[in-house]
Image: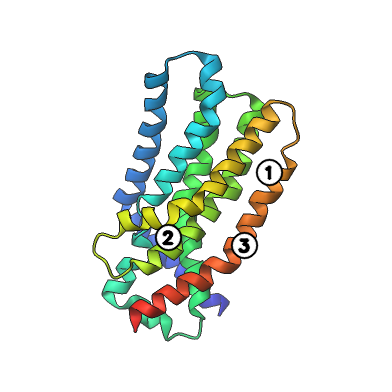
Amino acid sequence: MLKIFYSIVKRDIKLSYRQGNTNLNILIFFLLSISLFPLGVGPENELLSKIGPGIIWVSALFSSVLSLDKIFQGDFEDGSLESMYFSELPLELIVLAKALAYWLTTGFLLVILSPIFGVILVMSNEGIFYLTITMLIGTPTLILLGTIGASLTVSLKRGSMLISLLILPLYIPVLIFSVSAIEAEINNISAKPQLLLLSALLCFSLVISPIAAAAGLRVNME
């Protein structure tokens, strides 16, 4: 089963880089959305440093939603998902494999870019460090929760807007705890409670999201 899991991850990563426009669009959106905030609020370093964590996290949140409908849709339309469904690998692990591949090709890029934007927004070294930590914990959670919406709208041609409406409320705790952790460290307050809550959300989504997404896929494939 581990071999099948690995082959799905590897296959999805290869497909993602062959269809590079999607990844490029996500990165461009992330770049532009962060770049526009300083133009709107002004170039004051103190203000940018204060609102920087929120700017980066909101941009990452919306960037991660952009192509969530593509996680299952292509495989659903060409019959690949049905073939995977009848393989010996449980559908829940198939969901997990596809979520991992999606994070490696999109979420991980946001994690890598976030410290660069932290420097641009004049964040402190502590703020940048905890920004990276929260992104590393938070972005997989966003994608795992996103698989639930993607599974429910897999049969729709343009389900990205509906996915946003379904999952954005689930993203709010991740956003709140992430920004709160960064601000706590900037103000010399321990961020341990927020990081523990973020980790708990990740563990929760690792268990619940594959089960819920698999149920949604079964409904659409029957």
The alpha-carbon separation of the residues under discs 1 and 3 comes to 15 Å
In the image: residue 6, left or right of residue 130: left
Q: Can residue 113 be seen in this view?
A: no
Direction left: furthest residue: 157
Q: Where is residue 152 in the image (x, y as percent from the top left)?
A: 37, 68
132 or 179: nearer the eye?
A: 179
> Residue at position x 42%, y 15% from top?
42
Quadrant containing the C terminus in the rendered view: bottom left
Along the polypeptide, which appears first: circle 3 or circle 2?
A: 2
Give the crowd class for mark 3: few <14, some 14-19, many >=20 residues within 10 Å: some
Q: Mark 3 points at which residue?
A: 204
3D distance between C-alphas at marks 3 and 2? 25 Å
Mark carried by residue 194: 1
Residue plotted at (48% across, 43% down): 110
Instruction: Say which of marks 2 and 1 sits in front.
Output: 1
Give percent across and percent down for residue 116.
Answer: 51, 30
Q: Is residue 8 above or below residue 126?
A: below
Q: Distance between the residues labelled 2 and 1?
A: 32 Å
**What secondary structure is marked by label 2?**
helix
Which badge, 1 or 3, comes first in the chain's sequence? Answer: 1
Residue 200 x %, y %: 67, 56
Q: Label 3 amino acid?
A: Phe
- Which residue is label 2 attached to? 13
Residue 128 appears in the rendering: yes
- Tell me the amino acid under the disc marked 2: Ile
Q: Which residue is drawn at 36% across and 58% down?
A: 163
Residue 27 pos. (x, y %): 38, 41
Q: Do the residues labelled 1 and 3 touch (CB within 8 Å)?
A: no
